[in-house]
């Protein structure tokens, strides 16, 4: 039982807000920032569907999203996004998939956080 509580705490920690130096900064390509930043998984979920789809493809192929999700402590989401890399997927379709994955994960983590709070 104690192991489950530790696991849940780490998962829920992925929902935290990070400092600006740990935030995710969206770029269209190297040297072309979009001016959009996410300091939490929730913020990421809220803005990813509005981001230039070529930015999403750029970050997926460079493993940027994976790295950021790992830094947040969400290995599961990092693995899901890794599965999108190297596929012949249009930028618009890729943006939709990333958006859906992140929103689903935020909902899952929110439920875990809620059940943890009721204990």
Image: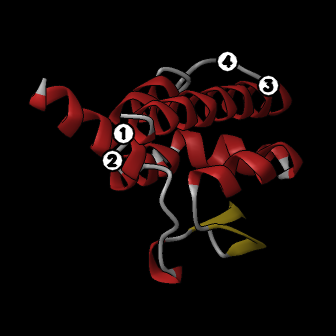
Q: Position of residue 14 (x, y in %)?
A: 43, 49
84 lies left or right of 94? left
Q: Secondary structure at mark 3?
A: loop
Q: Are marks 1 and 4 in contact (CB under 8 Å)?
A: no
Mark 1 vs mark 4, CA separation in Å: 31 Å
Q: Residue 63: which quarter of the image?
A: top left
Q: Which residue is mark 4?
A: 88
Q: Secondary structure at mark 4?
A: loop
- Residue 5 or 87: which is nearer the viewer? 5
- Residue 94 or 70: which is nearer the viewer? 70
Q: Which residue is mark 1?
A: 11
- Residue 57 or 50: which is nearer the viewer? 50
Q: In the rendered view, tell whether residue 42 sits above or below residue 20.
A: above
Q: Disc 1 vs disc 4: which is toward the camera?
A: 1
Please tell me which of labels 3 and 2 falls first in the chain: 2
**Residue occupying the point 60% across, 37% down:** 106
Q: Which residue is mark 3?
A: 90
Q: Secondary structure at mark 2?
A: loop
Around disc 4, counting alpha carbons within 10 Å, would you say few (fewer than 14), some (14 to 19), or many (20 or more)?
few
Mark 2 vs mark 1, CA separation in Å: 7 Å
Q: Disc 4 vs disc 2: which is toward the camera?
A: 2
Q: Secondary structure at mark 1?
A: helix
Q: Are marks 3 and 4 in contact (CB under 8 Å)?
A: no
Q: Which residue is mark 2?
A: 73
């Amino acid at each position: 039982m104690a192991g489950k509580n530790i696991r849940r705490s780490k998962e829920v920690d992925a929902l935290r807000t990070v400092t600006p130096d740990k935030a995710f900064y969206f770029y269209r390509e190297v040297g072309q920032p979009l001016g959009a930043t996410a300091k939490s998984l929730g913020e990421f979920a809220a803005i990813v569907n509005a981001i230039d789809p070529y930015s999403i493809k750029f970050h997926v192929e460079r493993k940027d999203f994976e790295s950021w999700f790992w830094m947040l402590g969400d290995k599961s989401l990092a693995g899901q996004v890794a599965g999108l890399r190297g596929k012949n997927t249009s930028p618009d379709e890729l943006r939709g998939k990333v958006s859906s994955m992140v929103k689903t994960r935020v909902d899952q983590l929110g439920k875990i956080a809620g059940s943890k709070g009721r204990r």
